[in-house]
Image (cartoon, grey):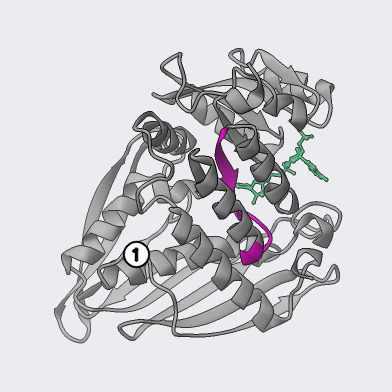
Amino acid sequence: MTSSETPTTPRSGKIRWGLLATGHIAGKFATGLRHSRTGVAVAAGSRTAESAARFALDFPTILGIHGSYVELLANPEVDAVYISTPHPLHKEWALAALKAGKHVLCEKPVGMNAAEAGEIVAAARASGRFFMEAFMYRCSAQTRKIVEIVKSGELGTIRMISAHFCFNGGDNTDGRLLNKELGGGGILDVGCYPVSFCRLIAGAANGIDFAEPEEFCAMGHLGETGVDELTTALALFPGGIQARMTCGVRTEAEIRATIYGSSGRLVINQPWNPAPEGGSTTLQLFRNTERPTITKLVEIPVAIDGHLYGVEADTVGDAILAGKTEPESPAMTLDDTLGNMRLLDRWRATIGLQYDADA
Ligand SMILES: NC(=O)c1ccc[n+]([C@@H]2O[C@H](COP(=O)([O-])OP(=O)(O)OC[C@H]3O[C@@H](n4cnc5c(N)ncnc54)[C@H](OP(=O)(O)O)[C@@H]3O)[C@@H](O)[C@H]2O)c1
């Protein structure tokens, strides 16, 4: 069988995953696959056969060991490919994987900019294969619960959303977080989370899957490698909803989200990585009882369905097995991905950050 004849649904009953790149997050995803109902890791492709073999040592189900990404995509035993190269390579390998007839889960950001995202989404739609941008928090029970609470009206009218993802990734200017050629910088690496969250919540408040802002402004600090190290954005969404978003890769700061409504506020202490190994997490709802100062805290336990990356794999697996080509919101739909990338472009343009891919 040639690669273009790869079946759209697996014959084995389980989705057979091939991992394209074997870095940090590929290890987490392969670990998640051990807990997946629907999928199993069967192959790994790396730039060298040695690193593919080294990676496979920890994952006995990986029998396909490939010394190039091309070789991985030619493996007919692979139904779906998980792409976790640095961002500038996402487009090339997402397009190649779709061309090879594979279903694709591609790490965030799906490309370097909205133009690249548009090419990928067009190819995905033409291919008839499943495609999703890998925002695992969008697949979690916690995110579904947050959307449910916003839609229920329990917070009253939504007035403001704040969402932040800042961490100190160290001073290695050659590494992917700070190296501009590798797509370094906070907006693409972690700013995509607050942006996707605010669009999701503003959408839920307006009765739609996601919303786009009517106004936007930002400020930011570019470091010595020319990438954004810390930046803050403000946006105004339909319904007068204000959003505050901060991201950074060189400053230990907030990792949290809060949704403020006329009747109370919802605090999400672990918005992006809730109970990563499974178990439970808690949302805090502060309900206004006697305005303006008295609030009542209600702890909302959320049972997390399982290992977060396994849940992400099952979001993909369930959709593929149901014959779908994209997931259902709040997981990242193709239109959601396009809107998210457009807002990331806008954020970067506002603070003067361009990559070669933008030329
Ligand atoms: N969803 C999440 O929770 C999450 C978390 C972290 C990162 N990510 C995303 O996943 C992607 C990878 O992040 P990571 O932290 O896994 O990075 P990483 O540890 O540096 O791994 C990236 C891998 O890409 C491959 N690669 C191909 N060309 C490369 C090049 N020129 N330089 C360096 N590596 C190259 C390498 O694998 P081979 O040697 O096997 O070819 C490398 O191990 C990023 O797009 C990031 O945004 C997502």
Residue 109: in magenta span = yes
- Kindly state the secondary structure of the residue where label 1 is placed: strand
Count neighbours of disc 1 (C-alpha within 10 A) and say few if under 14, some if 14 to 19, many if 20 or more.
many
Residue 351 % position (x, y): 69, 81
Residue 258 % position (x, y): 38, 69
Q: Which residues are magenta?
A: 102-115
Q: Indicate which quadrant contains ligand 1.
A: top right
Residue farthest along the left direction in this orientation = 290
The image quadrant of residue 59 is: top right
Q: Is residue 242 above or below residue 322?
A: below
Viewer-closest of 318 and 123: 123
Q: How many badges with numbers are in the image?
A: 1
Residue sitting at 56 percent across and 26 percent down? Answer: 17
Viewer-closest of 65 and 30: 65
Q: Which residue is mark 1?
A: 267
Residue 210 % position (x, y): 37, 66
Q: Image quadrant for the N terminus? A: top right
Viewer-closest of 178 and 115: 115
Residue sitting at 50 percent across and 27 percent down? Answer: 33
Q: Is residue 66 visible?
A: yes
Q: Is residue 187 above or below residue 277?
A: below
The image quadrant of residue 42 is: top right
Is the distance from the Cβ of mark 1 to the nearest ligand 1 atom less than 8 Å? Answer: no
Q: Is residue 3 above or below residue 196?
A: above
